[in-house]
Amino acid sequence: MEKFNKLEGVAAPLHILNCDTDMIIPAQWLKTIKRTGLGKGLFQKDRYKDDGSENPDFVLNKPAYRNSKILVAEDNFGCGSSREHAPWALMDFGIRCVISTSFGDIFYNNCFKNGVLPIRVSPEDLEKLFDDAERGANATLSIDLEKQEIRGPDGGVITFEIDPHRKHCMLNGLDDIGQTNLKKSRIDDFEKKSSDARPWA
C-alpha cells in the first residue's frame, strides 16, 4: 500500500447526501478483482449521460476538478453495501482523501486498508471546506497526516482526529498483509518449531 504522509491538491465539492457505494462504483464494475481501470466507473451514473457522453454538470467533469486529489463530501458518505471496489475506484481516479462529517462504517474501514484517507470533521468545519472547494482551480487543500491538519488556500487550519493505529498504518503504507509481513520472522519461527515437533504433519 502506498504511504500517506502529506497530500496537496485540488478539492472537489460533492454535494450529495448519503452518497452510497453503488453511486461511487456501480455493481457492474464488481466483476473484476483488479484495482486498476475502476476510475472510469467512478460515479458513473452521475458522470455520464445515457448515451455515454460526459455530464458537464457533474463536478468531476468540470475542468477545474478533473485532477482532484481530495473530495469534500456531504454527510454519510460511502453508506450502503460493502464493496472494496469503492476505495479502489477513488484511488484509480486519483482521489487519496475524502473529507466528510460521517462515513458508512464498512467503507470507512476499507479506505484505510487501501490507501485512501477518510477524515471526519465537524459540520462547521465541513462548511468552511466546502467554501474552499468551491473556488475551482484555486481550491487547493493541504493534508498533513502526521500533524492531523487540513490547511486551506487562505492558510486557515482545521485539525482532525484519527485512531493512532490507523494513522501509523497509513504513514507507513501498511495494509493487512503488510502488517502480517512485519511478523514474518516470528511466523517462520513458529512454523519451524511446529514442523520439528510434528514432522509427520
Image (spheres, rainbow, N blue to C red):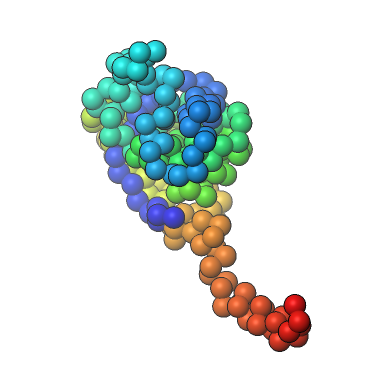
Give x and y (percent) for residue 95.
37, 38
Residue found 35% across the figure and 18% down from its top: 52
Where is residue 199, by image quadrant? bottom right
Work out whether residue 118 can be spotted. Answer: no
Residue found 60% across the figure and 36% down from its top: 82
Q: How many marks?
A: 0
Residue found 44% across the figure and 61% down from its top: 172
Image position of 174 (left or right of 157): right
Q: Nearer the viewer, residue 71 or 140?
A: 71
Q: Is residue 197 above or below residue 31?
A: below
Q: Is residue 49 above or below residue 77?
A: above
Q: Nearer the viewer, residue 71 or 110?
A: 110
Where is residue 55, by image quadrant? top left
Q: Kindly give the residue lying farthest to the bottom in the view shown.
A: 196
Image position of 22 (left or right of 134): right
Q: Nearer the viewer, residue 137 or 197?
A: 197
Give x and y (percent) for residue 193.
69, 84
Give the quadrant of the N terminus.
bottom left
Give the quadrant of the C terminus.
bottom right
Image position of 61 (left or right of 106): left
Give x and y (percent) for residue 38.
41, 36
Q: Kindly give the residue lying farthest to the top in the view shown.
A: 50
Residue found 31% across the figure and 34% down from its top: 68
Q: Is residue 115 above or below residue 58?
A: below
Work out whether residue 23 can be spotted. Answer: yes
Give x and y (percent) for residue 10.
29, 35
Q: Is residue 116 above or below residue 43?
A: below
